[in-house]
Image (spheres, rainbow, N blue to C red):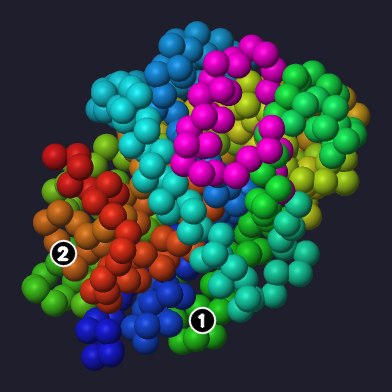
Amino acid sequence: MSVNGCSSVGIIGAGIQGVCIGLQLLKKNIPTTIFDSKDPGSMASYGNAGHFSPYAVLQLNRPDILYDVPKMLFSSNGPLALKWNYVPKMLPWILGYLKNCNKKSMLHTAKYMHQILNLSMDAYDEVFQEIDTSNLLEKKGIIYIWTNQNLKSRELEIKVRNDLGVKQKILSTKEILDLEPNLRPVFTGGAYYDYAYHARDPYGIVKKIFELFIQRGGKFINENVKSVKQSTNNETLIKTEKKEYKFEKSVIACGAFSKKLTDQLGEKIPLDTERGYHVHFKGMDKLISRPVIFLDRGFGMTPMNQGLRAVGTVEFGGLNNPISKKRIDYIVRCAKELLPQLKEHQDDWLGFRPTLPDFLPVIGPSKNNKNIVYAFGHQHLGWTLGAITGKIVSGIVANEKTNLDLSAYSSSRFG
């Protein structure tokens, strides 16, 4: 039995959430095993924008965005798309989203995102002290740019961040070009978060954290998990395609793939998938010094070791629809609008962001199975929130007290 009152833990999912939770559990002397059918960090963690975004308190459940949704959905040239064959399956999510798209819900989401985002970089700094991040991490800040097209939305974002005490520098076009002279000045202003980090190789960072987890005595089982259940008061069973494993507690941290398991546990959590895309422009990473996000287009660029990574768009279409060439074309077009010197792109990639209708993650015990703990639904901020989720979940598993209000992240909010 561990000193913290938990004898063993199984974690389902070897993305940034799973490996960070695993590492924190080992620090509490709790024997831990991670399960995944894929290589650690090879899913959403691999292909994200690489931004550590502690300022990103506002999400898509905003009345100002709701007004534009129909227009965006019916335009092939916009940041939002829908696979129409998926609409019937998405109806519960859509209804939940409409219910949450108001000022009160927006501010509730912003408040509880800020609570954990505000701790996110300190949690990562602790991890980064223990791994070699040479050529994997840069601390040059992140720039957001915009045009005059949606100034009311920009003013709303600036005000909500100011009210929560989020540090931001508002810049003119000239000040942005002083920082990034290669950008074509098709924008009218922006914001600079000079304290933000970005990854030169997100996959490389997850692998380093995973290697540390293994060095510290963690175990990895490369098998596909079919089910998880709580069999007795102090035993959970994780069943893979090959065999059954017993742990005192289990953690579900497999992102967009978590719903299959929570449905089995009798919880109707309206988790769905935002499909995100990326491409690389090889050898072009020196054109900008730091990530640049063009808010009007819902797209961004990050200088990485593989080249300049252009990422973005939100496409609702589930886990099984094929990659959309229109979405790739849109990202390439946006990138060349800002950097006309870009040539051919490579590496069309599609990943899945796990998203809930109120845009808050689910972090905490299952409603019906207290020894099964959830850690998924971080939408665009899974990368930023990996290390702090690891600390929070390991504390929950070890029955430690916390001064954080975790009620907003509970699965019980879905009735």
Q: Residues within 10 Å of mark 1 (few under 14, many from 20)?
A: some
Q: Secondary structure at mark 1?
A: helix
Q: 338 left or right of 191? A: right
**Which residue does the image show at 62% across and 71% down from the upper left?**
128
Q: Is residue 166 above or below residue 58?
A: below
Q: Which segment is the magenta one? A: 141-170
Question: Label 2 belongs to which residue?
Answer: 370
Say if the magenta span includes residue 182: no
**Which residue does the image show at 30% across and 67% down from the upper left?**
402
User: What's the amino acid at mark 1?
Assistant: Ile
Quarter containing the C terminus: top left
Say if the magenta span includes residue 158: yes
Q: 110 left or right of 313? A: left
Please say if the residues under marks 2 and 1 sit with CB atoms less than 8 Å apart: no
Q: Is residue 130 above or below residue 46?
A: below
Can residue 354 be seen at all in this image of the molecule?
no
Question: Label 1 belongs to which residue?
Answer: 214
User: What's the amino acid at mark 2?
Assistant: Lys
